[in-house]
Amino acid sequence: MNALGVVRTTAPAPEDGDRLLRRVEGLFQCHFLLETGISLLLPVWNFHTFMYEVFSHTPYLFFDSPVPGCAKTTLAAALSRVSKNGMLVVNPTGPSIFRTIDQDHPTLIIDEAALQKDSCLLTVANAGFSRMTGVVPRVFKDGVKKYNTYCPKAFASLNPLPETVMDRSIRIPMKGLRKEDKNKIMPFSEKSVPEDLVSSIATWVTAHKDEIVRNYEQCRLDFLHARQEDIWRPLFSIIRVLSPEREEEFRAIAIRLTAQKKEDEGDRRIRLLQDVRTVFHGGNVDV
């Protein structure tokens, strides 16, 4: 209390970064069977949602589920619970999404997005990856309104994403759950996320935002090519401040997932060429 009788309150001290990171990591490990390193990647992505506005690009996530029953929707729900202004939507339309982003600035988690069929939704996904290209103009009444579509996004789907969106995404391979696997994890519910977790992340990001921005401006990832470097730079800028001793571990995750995505893209193109040959040569395809 000062001389005027005004009580001064101090902002809560931020939690230790590595400890906080491991709390979020433990949440994903407790409730989901994920490939090695994914439980570290997801928390770092969660942290980025609290300051994505300062980055030139926001990395997309793609939960690639080969079959139903891989818990992609539940994982998407968990991700939304730990992100800033997380919003999980199912099969939305393009116009609803660009208005929602412009008004609410959410972390958008889209389950079963019909990107292949909805050209407007695809435009939002393509444009909203970059802060410089994230504005979509639309005719509104007697004029033109510009909608800002730049925000963090994650997609969960049984079907492949369009190539342009996949190029902007980190692919998260999902595993089919066997009967015996269910005993290894705990069911996820709204009560699974500790009440203080999101506020703790927000407090930590506020306290370290300037340091992360400085790291981002200097960050160069020579082991990744241009678009993939754009995707991963925000996350490396965060891990270097959040838990610097785990950067090498994080680097190995980035290299592995990027290589897997490149291999998957090559396989898809080969299958496409085989399909084309099937059409033009009556099914006589040399494999």
Image (tube, helix red, strand yellow):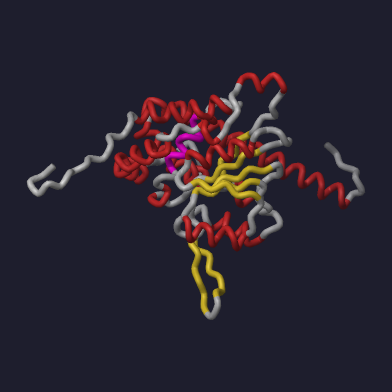
Farthest-out residue, front: 5
The quarter holding residue 169 reads top right
Q: Name which residue lies at 71% across and 36% down.
A: 66
Q: Magenta region: which residues? A: 40-48
Magenta stretch: includes residue 264: no
Residue 251, percent from left and from top? 47, 31
The quarter holding residue 92 reads bottom right
Relative height, residue 95 to residue 286 (above, below): below
Residue 147, percent from left and from top? 50, 64
Residue 140, percent from left and from top? 55, 74
Q: Name which residue lies at 40% across and 41% down.
A: 220
**Quarter placement of the N terminus:** top left
Residue 175, percent from left and from top? 67, 29
Choose between 83 and 161: the one closer to the eye.
Answer: 83
Choose between 140 and 246: the one closer to the eye.
Answer: 140
- Can you see residue 215? no
Please give left or right for residue 219 compared with residue 167 in the image. Answer: left
Q: How many marks?
A: 0
Relative height, residue 245 to residue 45 (above, below): above
Farthest-out residue, left: 3
Magenta stretch: includes residue 43: yes
Q: Name which residue lies at 87% across and 51% down.
A: 279
Q: Name which residue lies at 68% across and 41% down.
A: 266
**Quarter placement of the C terminus:** top right
- Can you see residue 188? yes
Please give left or right for residue 182 compared with residue 100 in the image. Answer: right
Relative height, residue 153 to residue 262 (above, below): below
Q: Main secondary structure of the magenta part?
A: helix
